[in-house]
Amino acid sequence: MTRRVLVASRNAKKLNELRRILDEAGVAGIEIVGLNDVPEYDEAPETGATFEENAVAKARDGFVATGLACVADDSGVAVDALNGMPGVLSARWSGTHGDDAANNALLLAQLGDVPDERRGAQFVSACALVADGVEVIVRGEWPGRIGRKPVGDGGFGYDPLFTPEGETRTAAELTPAEKDAQSHRGRALRQLLPHLAALADRG
């Protein structure tokens, strides 16, 4: 029997990322569905002070509303020269939620006079899984630095500005498989695999 698991997102790339990680790990018996696949419900605003608070709030909402085990993530970029900002405000840094181009442009403007050696940053992802008797929160981090202009057309968010540690390419230039292997969300989601496998076993 296949266990449906809700990912509290409408971002097809996030859904596919988890599907690929489950396939790669050989975890069977899980069908990943997104918010577009379930009846609409009231989603609480992301008001948490940390990625973890936002992720678990979204996962709890999804589980309560649908009865499905729910995975939610909250992620963003923490820039050293900005004292860890945009952080939890990453998706709406420019004032409009999800406007990647405006968010990237604002971040570049704020770092305009920051020298290369001080442009360190980390992508951070907190992922939460909530199901019957289960509440797990994990965190993944991906260190790197912020470039001076967007490069690459893959990925989303701040990927075109972010060059991972040890790489000459931006996150937007990596293949999906390369990104899964390294990324903050990939690192967090892999920590959820044993818990997802246990759900599949429970059916």
Image (tube, grey):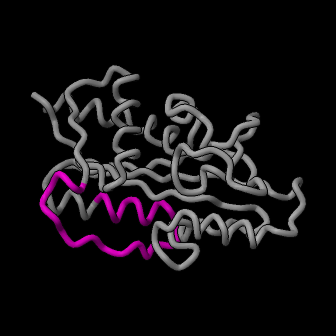
Query: In the rendered image, which quarter contains the N terminus?
Result: top left
Residue 178: x percent and y percent? Answer: 56, 30
Is 181 on the left or on the right of 31, as rendered? right
Query: Which residue ends up furthest to the top in the rendered image?
Result: 26
Q: Nearer the viewer, residue 97 or 196?
A: 97
Query: In the rendered image, which quarter contains the C terminus?
Result: top left
Q: Which residues are magenta?
A: 35-59
Total marks shown come to 0
**Is 52 in the magenta?**
yes
Among the 4 quarters of the image, the one containing residue 197: top left
Looking at the picture, does residue 160 appear above or below residue 93?
Answer: above
Residue drawn 62% across and 58% down? 77
Looking at the picture, does residue 12 appear above or below residue 168?
Answer: below
Is 78 on the left or on the right of 135, as rendered? right
Residue drawn 57% across and 73% down? 93
Residue drawn 58% across and 76% down? 94
Residue 155: x percent and y percent? Answer: 52, 45
Residue 24: x percent and y percent? Answer: 40, 22
